Amino acid sequence: MIYGLYALAALAEIAGCFAFWAWLRLAKPIWWLAPGLISLALFAWLLALVPSEAAGRTFAAYGGVYIVASILWLWLAEGRLPDRWDISGAAICLVGAAVILFGPRG
């Protein structure tokens, strides 16, 4: 369940941020902001559902998932093939997120 929440949260955050990017940088109509705001609210709600005793740890672990999802967005939504540095950096971040998420706690 945690993986699904992180994945859905990442999709919602990236879609919401992209709506703002498209309005500001790609000259899309202002109404693009409405679904962007809804998507960002959905992101916050989904991330709050992740079972964890500390918000900061949840957010930190999510960071790695977000980076990987952003590289996938680059490829699938923007049509730009990630290079070896994109993939290497995302893999390093995902390993860091796993350490945060699954590290033994005392």
Image (cartoon, rainbow, N blue to C red):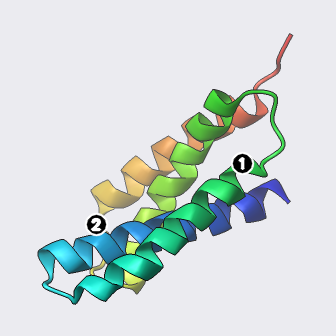
Q: Quadrant of the C terminus?
A: top right
Q: Which residue is mark 1?
A: 48
Q: Amino acid at mark 1?
A: Ala
Is residue 40 in view?
yes
Left or right of 4? Residue 100 is left
Q: Amino acid at mark 2?
A: Asp
Closer to us: 60 or 24:
24
- Cβ atoms at labels 2 and 1 below 8 Å apart: no
Residue 83's mark? 2
**Residue 36, relative to residue 4: is it above or below?**
below
Residue drawn at x 82%, y 21% as measured from the top left: 104
**Residue 9, relative to residue 56: is it above or below?**
below
Residue drawn at x 76%, y 65% as measured from the top left: 4
**Which element carries disc 2, helix, strand or loop?**
loop
Q: Nearer the viewer, mark 2 or mark 1?
A: 1
Residue drawn at x 67%, y 38% as measured from the top left: 58
| Pointer 1 local density, CA inside 10 Å: few below 14, some 14–19, many at least 20 | some
Residue drawn at x 84%, y 43% as measured from the top left: 51
Closer to us: 41 or 73:
41
